[in-house]
Image: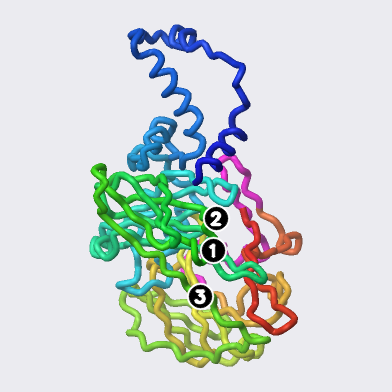
């Protein structure tokens, strides 16, 4: 940030006071604080500077004291005293394990997720949540932006600074880096700087979260004067209190993807990978002539036992979704795997947990919801009473509020309109040039 930009920001935040004279002695008297006369003028000046600048730094969720520390670059955030993350964020960390085979599951401890900072970026408040992992690492997510994991202690050591960024491609202009963020794994980092291609640099405040996270985080909007290739960011540098470089990360510009074809061609169905047999104890169920046997190892085998014209018609249109689920906090948690419908198909699900409560086969039979099955799947196999109630209530939609005091609603499916959330759009130039991605404001 340039000096002029800083002054302009201060002018917007604080009314002009050239003709005003504050009475600091009154403030001290009301606070019952006594200061030596020699220090009063210095304290008064320092207090004004802190009061003005504190609104410009990234403010951690736990209060003003750490925000003031951020003026020197680093703000320490005690993990244990940070605010617990809301249930919807815990669910996001839980879902990182869905579909992740061994070696790729971050194993985030969602119940320990914390809100540790709030950044100002893009004119909006961006909340940073973190959660430790069982492998000694952490996962993080920033609201409406991005997230990631360093799931193990070995992952921590790979890069002392990990960077994530956004590239903007305005119409008729060259792409540029518009936003940078990342994590700092150097525990002795005291200051953070971004170096630019034109030889200048800028100090960036960051938060450092204590163990078990033991990492720092930052978010930075690249100013207008550095949104050009010859002036853009080239590196992020962390220094200790003595000014020595303790970590450095290079900003590598990634060129935009090539143009998309005029129409999308569906990918052919891939054969299911070979999986072991279901392990004991086994669960069994049947619906519409399909028997499902599921095991403790997460393997489920779908096998047709008799002809069923309705089922065959529903599942004869290409790929189907084979899946199972388990209830957690009254929510069915699971996923489906796309495959061609066969007389016998076996899948293995990761991150769902066993025993399953139920399994299902979903087909493609319409583009309108509720569809011809009134929100049911083509095949619904319940192993538990909870799953039977779940399938029986398929004609209803359950709406749960974010806040604890928000009433839960159960509504008929036909009274609910489902709408997607569009985060961006592609605009195709009439001259056949590369499509331009235009982010939409999502919050």
- CA neighbours of label 3 inside 10 A, class few (<14), some (14 to 19), many (20+): few
Q: Secondary structure at mark 1?
A: loop
Q: Earlier in the sequence, mark 3 or mark 1?
A: 1
The mark lying in front, picked from 2 and 3, is 2
Residue 351, percent from left and from top = 39, 68
Query: Tag 1: Cα neighbours inside 10 Å, few (<14), some, or many (≥20)?
Result: some
Residue 414, given in percent of the width and then of the height, sits at 75, 64
Look at the picture and state if 118 lies above or below 340. above
**The residue stretch that appears in magenta:** 382-409
Q: Give the residue drawn at x 46%, y 70%.
A: 253
> Which residue shows up at 66% across the image and 89% down it?
313
The residue tagged 2 is 225
Regarding mark 2 in the picture, which secondary structure is present there?
A: helix
Nearer to the camera, 35 or 94: 35
Who's the residue at 49% across and 49% down the image? 87
Number of residues whose C-alpha sits closer than 10 Å to that of mark 2, classed few (under 14), some (14–19) or many (20 or more): few
Q: Are marks 2 and 1 in contact (CB under 8 Å)?
A: yes
User: Residue 258's image quarter?
Assistant: bottom right
Q: In the rendering, which numbered label is found on residue 228?
A: 1
Above or below residue 146? Residue 175 is: below
Asked if the magenta segment contains residue 389, the reply would be yes
Q: CA distance from mark 2 to mark 3?
A: 20 Å
In this view, 39 is above or below 238: above
Q: CA distance from mark 2 to mark 1?
A: 7 Å
Mark 3 — residue? 255
* Mark-to-mark CA distance, 3 and 1: 14 Å
| Residue 146 position in % (x across, y down) | 48, 60
């Amino acid at each position: 940030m340039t000096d002029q930009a800083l002054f302009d920001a201060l002018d917007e935040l604080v009314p002009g006071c050239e003709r005003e004279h504050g009475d600091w002695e009154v403030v001290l008297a009301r606070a019952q604080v006594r200061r030596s006369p020699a220090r009063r003028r210095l304290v008064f000046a320092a207090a004004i500077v802190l009061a003005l600048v504190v609104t410009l730094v990234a403010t951690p969720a736990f209060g003003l004291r750490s925000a003031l520390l951020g003026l020197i670059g680093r703000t320490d955030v005690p993990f244990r005293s940070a605010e617990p993350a809301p249930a919807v964020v815990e669910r996001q960390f839980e879902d990182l394990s869905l579909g992740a085979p061994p070696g790729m599951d971050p194993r985030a401890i969602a119940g320990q997720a914390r809100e540790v900072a709030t950044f100002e970026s893009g004119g909006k408040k961006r909340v940073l949540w973190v959660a430790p992992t069982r492998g000694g690492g952490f996962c993080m997510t920033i609201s409406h932006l991005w997230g990631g994991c360093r799931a193990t202690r070995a992952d921590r050591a790979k890069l002392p600074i990990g960077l994530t960024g956004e590239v903007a491609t305005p119409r008729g202009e060259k792409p540029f880096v518009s936003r940078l963020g990342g994590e700092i794994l150097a525990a002795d980092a005291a200051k953070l700087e971004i170096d630019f291609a034109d030889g200048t640099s800028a100090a960036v405040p960051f938060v450092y979260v204590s163990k078990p996270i033991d990492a720092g985080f930052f978010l930075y909007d690249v100013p207008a004067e550095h949104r050009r290739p010859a002036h853009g960011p080239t590196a992020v540098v962390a220094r200790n209190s003595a000014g020595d470089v303790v970590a450095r990360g290079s900003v590598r510009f990634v060129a935009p993807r090539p143009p998309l074809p005029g129409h999308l061609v569906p990918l052919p169905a891939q054969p299911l990978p070979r999986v072991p047999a279901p392990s004991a104890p086994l669960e069994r169920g049947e619906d519409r002539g399909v028997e499902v046997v599921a095991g403790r190892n997460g393997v489920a085998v779908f096998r047709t036992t008799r002809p069923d014209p309705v089922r065959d018609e529903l599942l004869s249109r290409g790929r189907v979704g084979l899946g199972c689920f388990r209830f957690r906090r009254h929510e069915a948690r699971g996923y489906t795997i796309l495959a061609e419908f066969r007389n016998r198909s076996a899948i293995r699900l990761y991150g769902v947990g066993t025993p399953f409560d139920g399994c299902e086969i979903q087909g493609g039979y319409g583009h309108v919801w509720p569809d011809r099955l009134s929100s049911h799947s083509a095949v619904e196999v319940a192993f538990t009473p909870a799953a039977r109630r779940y399938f029986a209530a398929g004609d209803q939609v359950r709406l749960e509020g974010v806040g604890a005091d928000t009433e839960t609603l159960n509504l008929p499916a036909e009274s609910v309109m489902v709408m997607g959330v569009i985060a961006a759009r592609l605009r195709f130039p009439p001259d056949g040039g590369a499509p331009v991605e235009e982010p939409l404001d999502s919050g």
